[in-house]
Image (cartoon, helix red, strand yellow):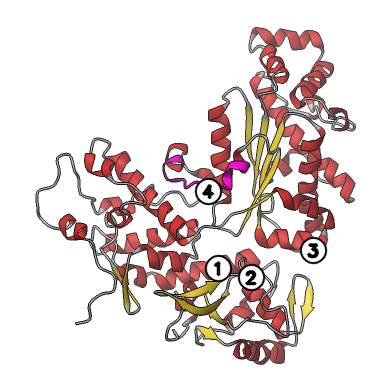
Amino acid sequence: MTTPKFRVPAFQSIRLSKDPLPENHHLPSREDLITEDLFGNEAGEDEDPEILNSYFVEKTEFAAFYSPKSKFRVVRARKGLGKSALLRKSYLLQKAEDPDSIAIHVKGSDLIALQPLTATTPNDLIYAWQQRICSRINLELGSRLKLAFSDDAITLVESAEVAGFKDRNIIGSLIDRLGRKIGKAELAKLSIVNPVSFLTRFADKTTHYVSVFIDDIDATFINTDEERLRVSTFFSACRHLVNTVQGLIIRASVRTDVWGLLRQFDESLDKCEQYMLDLRWSRNELTAILCKKILAYFQRKFPASPFYTALNVGECNFEILSLVFSGAFKWGERYMSPDRPIQSLSSCRPRWAAQLCKMAAMRAYKRNSTRISVGDVKDVARAYGYARIDDLYREHRHQAMHLERLIECFATGPSIYATSHLLALIEQKILHKFGTLEIDGIAVTDSMQIAYFLFRIGFINGTGRYLGPQTEVIHFEDRPNLLTLELNPDDGLSWGIHVSYWAPLRIQSNPNQAE
């Protein structure tokens, strides 16, 4: 029998033995596997604040995103990487650090619903977005003053008001406007119920800010001229507004693919590039998220247990994983820690990892196990893969109307292609059969441009030389210029279909395929 390359720590045999357990220690149960908060809420903005804080993994680049010194920041990432969670975390930090500040967390759709958008020119759209943001702040002011803004008569943001904010504190400007709108005497009467002086003091304090966190501004985006103009002017409006008034901070999110289309359409967005935070997670960071979720769950459930208290993420990851996973996993020809297959199948996207773990946990529960085995992960691979393909279509169909046609041409084929073979397949199954493929509104007749699109959306990645126990994997974010140069299109790389798509597309695994 071949000796496993991954050796299970002695801890595993101790944990699963019948030796006496430490005092106050409780073994994980079968019911723990299907408890909702074991692997966290898949929607970061809906997560309980205490639970989110318990497993949130910080990155050095988040510091500028949190800092009130940075008036405008946008987190840019693919779906499932945690844009909403980062916005939610930033919002909670702002409220905790300065309870007297005004912090507003809002969906893009809620912001749009505040006022109809009838403008059609860039300048008018920029102005309309500024009005909406200020209107949302006004609603928060009304809440603090116990004053209901129920109709257009009390709407504070009208023509020329935004221009009147220049170089003034935004709260002071809005309070002045409120006084003119309903009268100084009426405004003074409000102090009996909820002192206006609070907001006045707020406006006078330079240490306080109004922070607006805007999520999913591109949630319903489709690749049309009208939609590109609508979304691109939002970012220009934010940049102009924070530079016009004092005390205003704006944080927002955008999908990587949408931003790429907007920049091609609107050159003025080049000025926003400096405010972008590109969010990605390494393998180690995804493992840390997974371990922190598991450990935090058991520490919440058994707060008096010294056993769980003694565990630390980073120092005993395998021990933490062993609370819900059944030892080392045999994946391919090697034994490895159970987080490794999850990293690969999820493409290091926290939401995908949570979905995969929940599906495998339900499979383990149904077979009356207290731990997830490698068999459970493999058994749900096809259903999980269909979910990933559905995500791929929903995320990128606006870029390629017949995306399904393109993806399905790889069904039942190999998992790795040399560049020449990849281009030949596209020529034969797409271009010869259908003539063209429309990508980003342009009719494409070149096989390399189509291959580049597949690389850009993450359906294929570059695969190269072996690095220790695994193969080098190159993502679009690592080398965005690959498949763009005729003389050196691949730099010696082959092209591997991402492993999460293998099962539903019945992909044939190649020897030595990268995980």
Left or right of residue 19: residue 266: right
Is label 4 in a helix, a strand or a loop? loop
Q: Residue at x 68, y 56 (%)?
A: 220
Q: Upstream in the sequence, badge 3 or badge 4?
A: 4
Q: Does the segment drawn in magenta span residue 510? A: no
Q: CA distance from mark 3 to mark 4?
A: 30 Å
Q: Upstream in the sequence, badge 4 or badge 1?
A: 4
Is label 2 in a helix, a strand or a loop? loop
Q: CA distance from mark 1 to mark 3?
A: 26 Å
Region of the chain picked out in magenta, as a range: 53-64
Residue where numbered disc 2 is placed: 479
Quadrant of the frame with the C terminus: bottom left
Report x, y in % for residue 187.
Answer: 75, 12
Label 2: few (<14), some (14–19) or many (≥20) C-alpha neighbours in 10 Å = few
Marking on residue 390: 1
Q: CA distance from mark 4 to mark 2?
A: 22 Å
Q: Upstream in the sequence, badge 4 or badge 2?
A: 4
Instruction: Please identify, in this view, whether the residue under mark 4 or under mark 1 is nearer the observer.
Output: 4
Is label 3 in a helix, a strand or a loop? helix
Q: Upstream in the sequence, badge 3 or badge 2?
A: 3
Q: Residue flagged by tag 1: what amino acid is it?
A: Asp
Marking on residue 59: 4
**Which of these two is toward me, 189 or 200?**
200
Marking on residue 514: none
Dividing the picture into quadrants, the one containing residue 189 is top right
Label 1: few (<14), some (14–19) or many (≥20) C-alpha neighbours in 10 Å = few
Mark 2 vs 1: CB contact within 8 A: no
Mark 1 vs 3: CB contact within 8 A: no
Residue where numbered disc 3 is placed: 264
